[in-house]
Amino acid sequence: GTYAMPSNPDSLVIRAGRVARNLNYVRLLGGMTISAIPDMAKVVFTHGLISTFRDGFLPLISNFRKYRLASDEVKLAGTALDMVLDSRTMAMADITDDFGRHSKFERGLSAISSKFGVVSLMAPWNAAMKQFAGVVTMTNILRAAERVATGAAEKGDVRKLAASGINLDLAKRIATEFAEHGERGEVWLAQTGAWADRQAAEAFRAAV
């Protein structure tokens, strides 16, 4: 995002381009329809059909209270915050925050764009999908960490944890903290806020 940065970001040409991007974002409803379609299949492609239904859909239907608690854990990991930040869609449209006072029209259009994700339902859709994916991901990480800790890990477990930045030592520490503070059931609650091993908690949240 630094290539060909303008020497004068407050010039008329740069400001006109910014206005055009904001207008285009609103005109296209933030790309809501096109981008929402593949979201529904992404969780299945990542975690498989069985895990998606077992760890996602079933808890969502049968125990919504626990599912919401797990969703809050996903938010603690720093994701599914689109209702507040709407950062994902704004970054895709290249209309991230700009410095400067600008004109009233530009400030008004920028405010409309930043809130338009809620109007087009993109923000709540993204937040809901990230929460759902996060709940499934969280359960899979905890299961894999437990298998590593008990010596029953498969190659796939080690590979997926490693891809998320969790080595064998961290996996065992995550399993230890979860055994002490977590909760099993239809929904696996990590409850990282109570973990004493902060490095393990941060690694777990980063993986989620």
Image: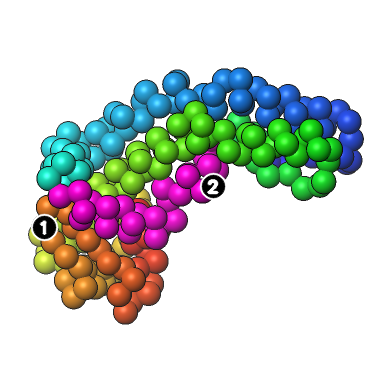
User: What residue is drawn where x is 31% and y is 68%?
Assistant: 192
Residue 175 sits in quarter: bottom left
Residue 185's tag is 1
User: What residue is drawn where x is 30% and y is 43%?
Assistant: 133
Task: Tell me whether circle 2 and circle 1 mark residues in contact (CB < 8 Å).
Answer: no
Residue 82's tag is none
Question: Looking at the picture, does residue 33 appear above or below residue 107?
Answer: above
Question: Looking at the picture, does residue 12 appear above or below residue 175?
Answer: above
- Looking at the image, which is closer to me, 78 or 155? 78
Label 2, on which residue? Answer: 85
- 121 sits to left or right of 43: right
Q: Secondary structure at mark 1?
A: loop
- Looking at the image, which is closer to me, 141 or 111? 111
Residue 64 lies in magenta, yes or no?
yes
Task: Give coordinates of residue 8: x percent, y percent.
Answer: 89, 40
Kind of residue at badge 2:
Leu
User: What residue is drawn where x is 69% and y is 37%?
Assistant: 110
Q: Residues within 10 Å of mark 1 (few under 14, many from 20)?
A: few
Kind of residue at badge 1:
Gly
Q: CA distance from mark 2 to mark 1?
A: 32 Å
Q: Which residues are magenta?
A: 63-89
Task: Give coordinates of residue 206: x percent, y percent.
Answer: 40, 58
Question: Looking at the picture, does residue 100 appear above or below residue 106?
Answer: below
- Res 139 visible: no
User: Going from the N terminus, do you reach mark 2 or mark 1 first?
Assistant: 2
Q: Secondary structure at mark 2?
A: loop
Task: Give coordinates of residue 89: x percent, y percent.
Answer: 53, 35
Task: Give coordinates of residue 36: x percent, y percent.
Answer: 40, 27
